[in-house]
Each structure stands twice: as C-alpha cells, then as structure tokens.
Image (cartoon, helix red, strand yellow):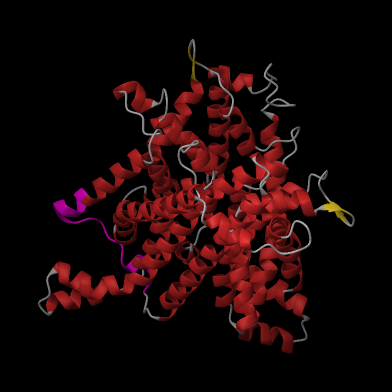
Amino acid sequence: MALPVAFFAVFFAWPVVSIVDRGLRPDGSWRFGRIGETLNRPDILDVLGFTAWQALASTGLTLLVALPGAYVFARFDFPGKGVLRAVVTVPFVLPTVLVGTAFLALVGRNGLTDELWGLRLDTGVWAILLAHVFFNYAVVVRTVGGLWSQLDPRQEEAARVLGASRLTAWRTVTLPALVPAVSAAALMVFLFTFTSFGVVQILGGDAYTTLEAEIYRQTARLLDLPTAAVLTLVQFAAVGAILALHAWTVRRRETALRLVPPERTARRPRGAGQWALLGGVLLSVALLILLPLGVLVERSFAGPGGYGLGYYRALGSLDESGTFLVPPLEAIGNSLRYALAATAIAVVIGGLAAAALTRRAGRLVRGFDALLMLPLGVSAVTVGFGFLITLDEPPLDLRASWILVPLAQALVGVPFVVRTMLPVLRAVDERLREAAAVLGASPWRAWREVDLPLVRRALLIAAGFAFAVSLGEFGATVFIARPDSPTLPVAVARLLGRPGELNYGQAMALSTILMVVCAVSLLLLERLRTDRTSGEF
C-alpha cells in the first residue's frame, strides 16, 4: 500500500487541500464564515439546486431508457450481440467534451434537428439530459445486465408454476434480487452526472451551470479561490456520501445472491412481445447512441463546398486566429503519448493497490478502497488548478514538465484498474501461493508464477480502460496542458470556443479522430473480455 498511498497523498490530497487552504485561510487564519456566506448567495444556491436536479433527472431518465436494454443483453441471444455490447459501451469511455460536441452537431445550431425541423434543444436542459443518458447507458447495461444474466430463471419459473402471474413473479422474485444492482447503477450515474463538466460546458453555456462548471468559472475566470474552495468542500461531502451508499449496495449485491453462469440464462427471443422489445432496444440504441456519433462524423466531412476532407487537411496547419501555437493535428500525438504514460502509471499504482486490497482486511484497507474512488467524484478542475499551485517548487517543480498531464490523467485511470483487477485477484486460490512458498519461491516469484498468468488478461483490460479514460480526460488537463502541447479534448474545446465555420468543422474532425481511437481501444477490450470481468464492470 505504500506507493499507492504516497501517490494519492502527493498528487491528489495535497493539491485539493492546498486549494481549500488558500481559499479559506488566505492570510494565515481560518475564515469558516465564508462557507455560510457563499452557500447563502442566491446564484450559488441556483447552481447547487440545478446540479442536484439535473443529476436526479438524468439518473431517472437513464434508468428508464437503459433497463430494457439491460434485460435484452442479459436474457436474449441474438446475432451481433457482442458487437452491439461494445457499441453501447463506447460512449462511456468517450471524453465528455466529445459527447457534448456530438449532441451539439445533432440538436444545436445548424445541427441535424435544426436543419430538418427547425428544432434546437441546446437552448434548454434537454440536450444536457440526453447527453447524460448517452454517456451513462453502458453503466446500467453493464452493472444491472451483468447481474441479471446470472440470476437463475428457474426461481421465477417456480413462482409461475405456483400460480403467480408473469408480473407478480418478476416483482416478487427477480426485482428484489436486482434492487442492489439497480441502486448501485443509479448511484454511479448520479455521481457522474452530479460532477458533470464537459457536457455542461458545451451544451449549457452560461444558462445552465453545474457545481463542477462553477468551480471552473470561479477558479479560472474570476480567480475567486474562497468561493471555489467552499464549492469543492460541498462537492467532496456530497461525493463521499454517494460513495458510501455505493459501497453499501455493492456489499449487498456481493453477499445476497446465488448466481449461475450467464450462458445458461440467455436464449433467442420468443413471441411477438419479446421480438418487439428487442426491436425497441435496437431502435433506442440507434437513435440515442449511433445517431449522435454518425452526425458528428457527417459534420466533419461537410465543408462549405460539399463533402470532402477539407476540415481534416486544415488540422495540419495554423490559422490566423492564434488559437493554437502548433497545428491542431499535433494534439493526436500529444494525447497518445500522454495516455500511454498515464496508463503505465495507473497500471503500476492500481495493480499494487488491488493486490493490497486482496491480501489485507480491516477498516484501514476499506478506507483506502474508498479513497481510490474519490478522483472519479472530486472536482478534476480543483485537482488541475491544485497541481499548478503546489507542484511549482523543488523537489517537485513539475509545472514546466510534460509528466504533469499523465499524472493527472492517471488519477482517473487508477480506479478503473483497481475495479477491473480486484475481482480476478480475489478469485486466485490462496493455496496456490502457499504451495509456491512451501516449494521455496520468494513472494516476488510466487506472484510472477502464480498470480500473473491468472490475471494477465484482466491486466490488459485494465490497461485498456486506463488508456481510454486518460485519452479523454479534460477537467484537470485543461489547466495544465501547455499551449504548445494540447491534448485532443483540450484542442476540441478551444476550437468550439472560437467563432467561424472552419473552427467548428475542425472541432468535428478532431472529435471524430478521438472517437475512432477510443472505439478501437474498446473493441480490442471486448475481444479480451471475460464474462467475469464484464459482470464486474
């Protein structure tokens, strides 16, 4: 645990604490009265209210749309199921900036709905809600569907034999078993939408602001650290409560169920009703997931003179606006280099943390487990700005170093590595390690000869997830990426922030490139996937 604890202490706790310290103790004395002053401001109350409201609305809408999909993937067997599972998971690993860009191309100004019917949804909250459903659809399908596929259907059939109707059997037998998984999925969706930043930045504009976006505005634009510090504490407290609830539901899910292999529960649809359900799910996937991505690609080729590669060619040169110090195309190489370095860091830190959580027990380790999840919910904006004010003096003067970006990205990748590797490591029979020790193997050799062959596939999957999420990290990177070395999400955001058709087209082209890289990474993961690891995701 030593190296992971040190990593999180230096690159997570220190930057966050420094922001709070500078905001609430500017002259050496604590000013806790600022907490009450900030939380009583009408504009801040509006931000807090909208953040909670949109997170609840996004969670409810996501469950409504995605639960039928979870059932279809769990209980039905149909051609192309594996490919479709990968397709619905693509949005989850896409950068939030790209998701916002895709929906801007679909429902924004000059978007598809605007051109066809004169309908724009980016002027209201619906674009944000739909983008959140798009982003979190896979969370429900993977979390609930992974469990649903392992529930023994014979229990529900026994209730039907005893005279219960189909609805009664499902309500009294299956639903109680699914409640922990549904609760866990709902809490995860709420967590992601509560801390939404990139989607709100692009689709919300100045009209709709979440807590995360307001922290960015107070920090980067207004330089109001006291307000940013208070909002960071509020977000930290809310995320801590959400993670505590999530841990409780996961423990219930792990201890309360009797499961069977997934291949014993899936079958081809029977009857008109089940085929209609399958068709409805396929239609919702096409409209909600494929259509925004398709429109994004179409806009990247649609130039003023017709379809072509004009926007892609323009990425290789500088424009006269001074938006970039280097051609936008260089962001591709920057992102790949940063993501590879972040993946290496995340695999080492996450692998050690997962091993520690496997070998040890107690409150200290459970607290460490919760700490590993905090970077997913604590403001990435706060972490990024904290890097700038803490890592600027020896012996950690990293502000001018390229490694600063991979370090911030690795913070987001570590939780995915831990969650992917932990179930497999826990499944390794401890007697194998003991036998190796009895035969004279050192702990290092026992790990290399026993654990590594068993967890190699999970390690590759963990590395793939870390690479994908590092590639799309935006909240912290937007602060620390140097002007001459932008990442793809930062470059897309800069282009969208500039007026003009050329900048918009280049943003679509860069977003398409980023989407392809993420999709290829995920398809490779799907080939390595095992039923056990996909169920945990």
Relative depth, front residue between 240 and 357: 240
Residue 272 belongs to magenta span: yes
Residue drawn where x is 74% and y is 26% of the image = 326
- Residue 22 at what x, y percent from top left? 73, 56
Magenta segment: 260-276
Q: In the rendered view, does 472 fall on the left or right side of 182?
A: right
Residue drawn where x is 48% and y is 49% of the image = 42
- The vertical placement of 249 against 306, above or below, is below
Residue 51 belongs to magenta span: no
The quadrant where residue 7 appears: bottom right
Relative depth, front residue between 60 and 268: 60
Q: Residue furthest right?
A: 394
- The vertical placement of 323 against 360, above or below, is above
- The vertical placement of 106 against 245, above or below, is above
Q: In the rendered view, does 463 fall on the left or right side of 111?
A: right
The quadrant where residue 439 appears: bottom right
- Residue 378 at what x, y percent from top left? 59, 58
Relative depth, front residue between 466 and 367: 367
The quadrant where residue 19 appears: bottom right
- The vertical placement of 238 against 361, above or below, is above
- Residue 380 at what x, y percent from top left? 62, 52
Residue drawn where x is 41% and y is 34% of the image = 122
